[in-house]
Amino acid sequence: MPIGEFSDRSGLSPKRLRSYAAAGLLLPAAIDSSSGYRYYSPGQMREARLIDALRTAGVPLAEIGSLLGDPSVERLDAWTRQVEVDAVQRQDALDLARHLLTFDYESAAGIPGQPRKEAMTTLQAAARTDIGRVRENNQDSVLCLDHLVAIADGMGGHPGGEVASNLVLTLLEAAFTGESLEELKAAVRAASHAISDRAAASEDLEGMGTTLCAIGSTGDGRLAVVNVGDSRAYLLRDGSLRQLTDDHSWTAELVRQGELTELEAVDHPHRGVLTRALGVAPKIDVDGALHTVVTGDRFLLCTDGLFNEVAESDILSLMEGATDVGVVADALVEQALSNGARDNVGVVVADVRT
């Protein structure tokens, strides 16, 4: 039956059904290849209501997926006991987010008058984002500073995706002072809690979340790279382009486990299903690593709107095509648009200036 009829029968809005599908919990029985219209089977009704009941009770999407794979009343009891603990943690996160939103960043960062640590690596960066050829709104957000660059790809439909991606970058900018990799990861975790609580407070924002990939300069001269979701970081050095981050998506996990080839993953119907995103669970694992850099290193942050449209060999050519980072960023976005740009496109190109 079409999604509209399934929505009426199940009592779940089409937007909520789409958010459950995006989380990999309730995938449509069929999708019309030409229109993209979704169809569900009557047999999915019980599962849809179960998922919605768990979500209404506050069970995170990731935990719901685990429960569906291994149904257990005992696990629900354990979740009930966890509610009080989570409530305290969420309140702490909200207090931190409130502090960050009112934080006098310029004064704390020493702008002007108090220069940053001399060892800190400086980035010369340019950021670009485009709505693309198909989407009706742009959910990609970018941040471009001399000590911190970041990109986020929101999800959850309009206006949730834009809110989530903008919120994480706002909090990241306020919280990161260049102290350490752990400081950057902690800021990401705090932002995830803030997104979750913002979504819970508004029905229009229900199901929103975002990916994130960021590079921050630390006091010892190295660069901290963090990511959640499938937005990526690349390093161009000595004519070679290397991906620094692992995608947190269903197909990427299967490729890493050897159950799917890279070629099979390209056209897989569940390619866009994420296994991690900010704002969808009380606890989030943030991948992070420190990288030693040299003058001349060039970094690229991008959303899937770039690498799904532009081959890596072409990305390499464009990254080497100009000395000006703004020219390179423009060229990358233009190439994605020329190739169809079925999604929003976001890029940040950053050169190391030690």
Image (cartoon, rainbow, N blue to C red):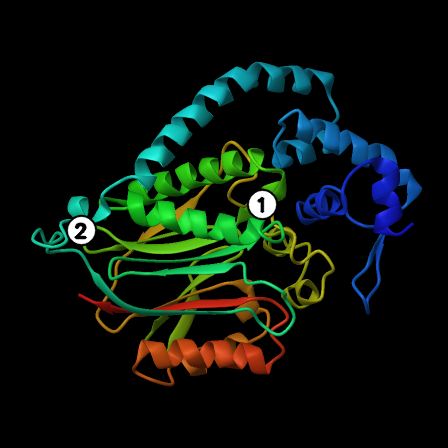
Q: Is residue 237 visible?
A: yes
Quadrant in which residue 128 is drawn: bottom left
Q: Which residue is mark 2?
A: 220
In the image, what residue type sits under mark 1?
Met
Q: Hey, which residue is sitting farthest left in the picture?
A: 113
Q: Tell me the quadrant of the picture where the C terminus can be found.
A: bottom left
Q: Which residue is mark 1?
A: 208
Whether residue 211 is visible: no
Q: CA distance from mark 2 to mark 1?
A: 36 Å
On screen, residue 119 versus residue 157, left or right, reads: left
Compared to 314, does 86 lie above or below?
above
Find residue 336 and report its horizontal and vertical position in percent.
55, 77
Name the spot of residue 173 as percent of width and height, x first: 32, 50
**Residue 86 vertical position relative to residue 31 in the rendered view, above or below:** above
The local crowd at label 2, few if under 14, some if 14 to 19, many if 20 or more residues have their Cα within 10 Å, is some
Judge from the rendering whether residue 280 lies leftward or rightward of residue 291; answer left or right: right
Nearer to the camera, 255 or 288 = 288
Q: Which residue is pictured at 57% across the width and 14% down the height?
A: 81
In the rendered view, tell whether residue 36 sits above or below residue 170: below
Q: Is residue 139 above or below residue 236?
A: above
Q: Please report whichever mark, 2 or 1, sits nearer to the chain's N-terminal start.
A: 1
Q: Give me the residue at 14% from left, 53% from top.
A: 111
Proximity of marks 2 and 1: CB atoms separated by less than 8 Å:
no
Q: Secondary structure at mark 1?
A: loop
Q: Which mark is residue 64?
A: none
Seen as rendered, the residue at the extreme bottom is 321
Q: Residues within 10 Å of mark 1 (few under 14, many from 20)?
A: many
Instruction: Name the residue at 26% across, 58% down.
Output: 292
Q: Amino acid at mark 2?
A: Asp
